[in-house]
Amino acid sequence: MEKKAFRKQQISQLSKMTAEQRVAQNLSLQQQLFASAAWQRAQTVAVTISSPIEVDTRPFVQQAWQEGKTVLIPKTLPHRQMAFYPYTASSQLERTKFGILEPVDGEAVAKKAIDLIIVPGLGYSLDQHARIGFGGGYYDRYLADFKGTKLTVAYQQMAFATAQWPVDAFDILLDEVLVAKEGERD
C-alpha cells in the first residue's frame, strides 16, 4: 500500500479506538517504557506533545520531571528541519499550522546531548523497526545522524509484523519498539 493511503487508513483506525482501549494500552506502555533500560539510562528525553490519536505522552513528561530528567520537545524549522528545546512546567507553547504544540522560546539543545528520543508515528514494523510518520520527513532528517536511542511506544493498532507500507532508503529504523500488551486490538 502506498504511504499516503496507509497514513489515511491508520488515522481512521486510531480515531476509532475507545477510551477504554486507550487507557489500558497507555498504562501498559507507561509501565514498559519506565522499566526499559533506555529510559533508566537517559538523563535527557525528547518527546512530542501527543495529539488525541497518539499514545498519550503527558505521563512520560510527568515521570521524567519526577525523576529529575531533562525533557525536550521538538520545534519545526524551515526546510523540513527541526530541533529540540527544553520543556518545563512554565514553558510557553504555541500551536503550529500542523496542530502541534511547540516551544515559543529557549535555546535548542545539541543533538549529542540527547540520550533518548521517543519517536512518534502511525505504524511500526516489528521485524525491522521501520516506522511511518505523518509524512513531513522531519524525524527521518533529524535521526539520520542521531547517536542516542531511538525508541517508540505503539498501540497494538500501530504494530505490524512487517511493514504494510514501502520502506525507503532514507527511512530511519528505530532501536526499539514497545507495543501495548493490554486492551483489545479491535
Image (spheres, helix red, strand yellow):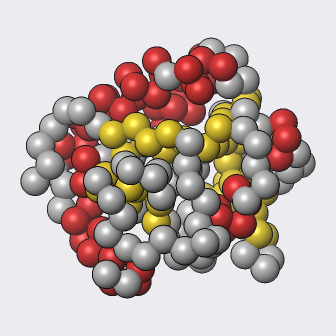
Coordinates of residue 129 in the picture (x, y in percent): 47, 51
Screen quadrant of the N terminus: bottom left
Residue 59 at x, y = what percent? Answer: 46, 31
Q: Residue 71: horizontal and vertical position, in percent?
A: 69, 34
The mark total stands at 0
- The residue shown at (50%, 39%) is 176
Relative placement, left or right, of 163 versus 104 is left
Q: Is residue 98 visible?
A: yes
Q: Residue at x 66, y 19 (%)?
A: 41
The residue located at (72%, 23%) in the rendering is: 43
Residue beneath the point at 47% across and 60% down:
131
Q: Is there any visible trace of residue 95 in the rendered image?
A: no
Residue 175, picture quadrant: top right
Q: Where residue 70 sits: x, y (%)? A: 73, 29
The answer to whether 122 is drawn above or below residue 128 in the figure is: below
| Closest to the observer, 95 or 166 | 166
- Lateral position of residue 123 relative to residue 97, left or right: left
- Name the one closer to the observer, 105 or 150: 150
Snapshot quadrant of residue 145: bottom right
Closer to the camera in the image, 54 or 148: 148
Q: Return the residue nearer the eye: 36 or 56.
A: 36
